[in-house]
Image (cartoon, helix red, strand yellow):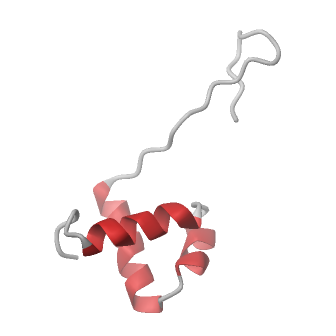
Amino acid sequence: MTMMAGLSKGVFILTRKHYSLDFKREVIRQVLQTQSPSSIARKHQINSFIIYRWVKEYKEGKYNSL
């Protein structure tokens, strides 16, 4: 959680990271080459669930060919 300056103590605002399509494609490519989503997640400091979702979406045709 991130605490924003100027807000009273104990008030937290969650922020969501946005990743570019090029970044997602690169991560997917790395996963497909290594078959190790967990190690790629650690390398990029991303939750592995996100990577699993991106790979699933890629296989469903959401992202153009790599």
Residue 14: x %, y % from top left:
61, 31
Quadrant of the drawing holding the C terminus: bottom left
Residue 47: x %, y % from top left:
59, 61
Residue 2: x %, y % from top left:
69, 31
Q: Left or right: where does residue 16 sit relative to residue 38? A: left
* Residue at figure coordinates x 72%, y 11% from the top left: 7
Q: Based on the displayed image, in which of its 4 quarters is residue 62 positioned?
A: bottom left
Whether residue 30 is situated above or below residue 5 in the rendered picture: below
* Residue at figure coordinates x 74%, y 17% from the top left: 11
Q: Nearer the viewer, residue 12 or 5?
A: 12
Q: Left or right: where does residue 56 sit relative to residue 46? A: left
Q: Left or right: where does residue 37 sit relative to residue 45? A: left
Quadrant of the drawing holding the N terminus: top right
* Residue at figure coordinates x 36%, y 63% from the top left: 24
* Residue at figure coordinates x 42%, y 71% from the top left: 27
Q: Left or right: where does residue 50 sit relative to residue 1? A: left
- The image shows a total of numbered marks equal to 0
Whether residue 66 is situated above or below residue 35 in the rendered picture: above
Q: Based on the displayed image, in which of its 4 quarters is residue 15 positioned?
A: top right
Residue 13: x %, y % from top left:
63, 25
Whether residue 53 is situated above or below residue 12 in the rendered picture: below
Query: In this view, which residue lies farthest toward the bottom?
Result: 34
